[in-house]
Image (cartoon, grey):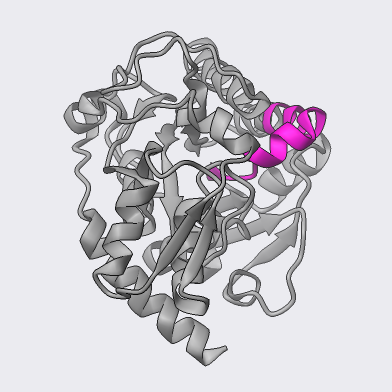
Amino acid sequence: MTTGKFERILITGALGQIGTELTAELRRRYGADNVVASDVRTVEGHPVINGGPWTSLDVTDAGAVSDLIGGMNIDAVFHMAAILSATGEKDPQLCWKVNIDGTLNVLEAARKHDLARVIIPSSIAVFGPETPRENTPQETVLKPRTMYGITKVSGELLCDYYVYKYDLDVRGLRYPGIISSETPPGGGTTDYAVEIYYEAIREGRYTCFVREDTMLPMMYMPDCIKATLDLAEADFDSLVHHSDFNVGSLSVTAGDIAESIRKHIPGFRVEYRPDFRQAIADTWPRSVDDSAARKEWGWKPDWDLDAMTADMLQKLGEKLRGS
C-alpha cells in the first residue's frame, strides 16, 4: 500500500456540511464522473446531486452498501455519513445505529471488494473530562460522555482492527469544529461557530448556546478538506497511526470569534445563554497536540481566525444577498 490515486470514489453523507464541499473538491481532482455521491436523503437541486453521479444510500443497510460498492467498481470510500453530537444526545440509539453499524458495513464491503482505501473521520468528541484539555495528546484517555463520542472511539478501534486483521488501508482524523460558508451546520456542539457568522450578517446580533469563554479547537472548511485529502493521498508506509490523527488549526473562544466579527461589523452584539451543549463542550479539548499528523503526513493549516472571518463574511454576505 502506497500513495493514493483512485479510479472510482464513493462518498457517503455527501449532502452534509463536510460531504458537500469534499464532493466538489474530489470531483475537481478526479473528474466528476469518477466520484459517486450518496446520502440517505435527497435535496432537489442540490449541487452535489446535479454535479455528477448520485445515488440514495442508507449506510445501515449492509446489502445496499456492498452492492453499490461492488456494482459501481468503487475502489475508495470517504465515509462521511454520521449522526453528530447534539443530535446524537436526542436520539442515542439512532446515533449508535448509523455511526457504528454504518461504519462496520462500509468496512465489511471494503474488505469483501478489496478496496484500495477507506477514509472514516473521527472527532474530538472521543475525548472526555478525564482527558487533558490543553494540548490534548495523540495518545490519551478516551472516556467520552456522549453517544457520539462513544461511537467515534469505537469506530477508531474498529478501523484499526481492520487495518491489522485484514490489511485494509483505513485512515481517519479527529475533526475539530468545522466552520463553513457553504453548508449550514448539522446538529453538532460547535454549530455556534457557524451560526454566529450568519446571524452577524442577517440580524447584527446572536444568542450563543455556550459561554463566552468556551474555547474549542476549530478549523475552516478549506483546511478541513485539505487535511482530509492530504491524509487520504499520503504514503501508507509513512503512517504510524491510522484512524485517530489529532489535527489542529484554531483554538478560539466564542468571544474571540465575536470580537473578530466586530472588526468588520462594529455593532455586532452577542448574548450568551448556555444550554445542554455547554456540558458537552466542557468535556472536549481546548487545544490538541497534532505533532503526529505533522510528522507522518505533513499536516499544516493555512487559515487563522481573522483571515477566516474576513472570508466567511464576504462569502456569506454575497450568498445571503443573492438569496
Judging depth in this view, the residue of 307 and 208 nearest the camera is 208
If the image is split into quadrants, where does the C terminus sit?
Answer: bottom right
Judging depth in this view, the residue of 239 and 111 nearest the camera is 239
Image vertical order of residue 202 relative to residue 124, above or below: below
Q: Main secondary structure of the magenta part?
A: helix
* Whole-percent x, y for residue 279 in the image: 57, 28
Horizontal side of 279 relative to 212 (left or right) equals right
* Whole-percent x, y for residue 230 in the image: 30, 45
Q: Please say whether residue 84 is one of the residues in the magenta stretch.
A: yes
Image vertical order of residue 157 relative to residue 317, above or below: above
> What's the magenta region?
76-101
Residue at the image position 65 percent from the left and 39 percent from the top: 86
Residue at the image position 58 percent from the left and 51 percent from the top: 10
Q: For residue 231, say whether it is visible.
A: yes
Q: Quadrant of residue 17?
A: bottom right
Horizontal side of 156 relative to 255 (left or right) equals right
* Whole-percent x, y for residue 239 in the image: 29, 24
Judging depth in this view, the residue of 181 and 32 nearest the camera is 181
Count of marks overlaid on the render: 0
If the image is split into quadrants, where does the N terminus sit?
Answer: top left
Residue at the image position 60 percent from the left and 37 percent from the top: 277
